[in-house]
């Protein structure tokens, strides 16, 4: 999915439009304890297009490459630990019981 101006879609060979929306079901907690709604851009690939089938229905699962997030998880974990070490009082677990 690439967001483009509407006028540009007609110049793309085999270009299609998919509906977009905003998901407001997630939230984050503010420092004062209040909840703030987080909005996330969504797109509907189950939407039936001009080709008569949705993008999801045209995908060949056996052709998809399987994704592994192991390397990413390791990097994120190491980053979190390094930040906790450098800034021990800025993490929520450093303030537990205070």
Image (cartoon, grey):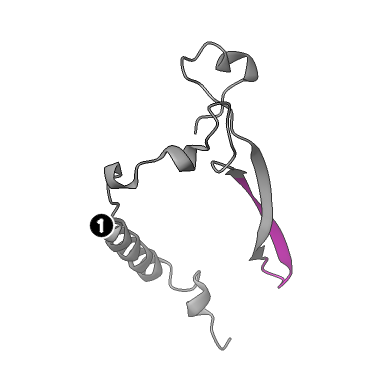
Q: Magenta includes 33?
A: yes
| Residue 67 image position (x, y, % from top left) | 30, 52
Frontmost residue, 96 versus 67:
67
Q: Magenta includes 67?
A: no
Q: Which residue is mark 1?
A: 71
User: Left of 19 or right of it: where is 16?
Assistant: left
Residue 12 vertical position relative to residue 36 in the rendered view, above or below: above
Residue at figure coordinates x 72%, y 67% from the top left: 35
| Residue 15 image position (x, y, % from top left) | 50, 21
Which quarter of the rendered picture does the C terminus lie within? Answer: bottom right
| Residue 83 image position (x, y, % from top left) | 39, 64
User: Left of 52 or right of it: where is 31?
Assistant: right
Residue 32 vertical position relative to residue 69 in the rendered view, above or below: below
Dot 1 crowding, Cα within 10 Å, few <14, some 14–19, many 20+? few
SS state under label 1: helix
Residue at figure coordinates x 28%, y 46% from the top left: 62
User: Left of 67 or right of it: where is 31?
Assistant: right
The quarter of the picture where residue 16 lies is top right
């Amino acid at each position: 999915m690439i967001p483009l101006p509407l006028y540009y879609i007609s110049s793309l060979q085999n270009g299609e439009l998919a509906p977009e929306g905003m998901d407001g079901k997630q939230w984050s907690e503010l420092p004062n304890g209040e909840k703030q709604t987080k909005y996330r851009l969504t797109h509907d690939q189950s939407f039936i297009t001009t080709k008569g089938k949705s993008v999801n229905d045209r995908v060949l699962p056996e052709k998809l490459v399987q994704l592994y997030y192991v390397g990413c998880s390791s990097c994120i974990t190491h980053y979190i630990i390094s930040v906790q070490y450098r800034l021990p009082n800025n993490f929520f677990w450093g303030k537990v019981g205070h």
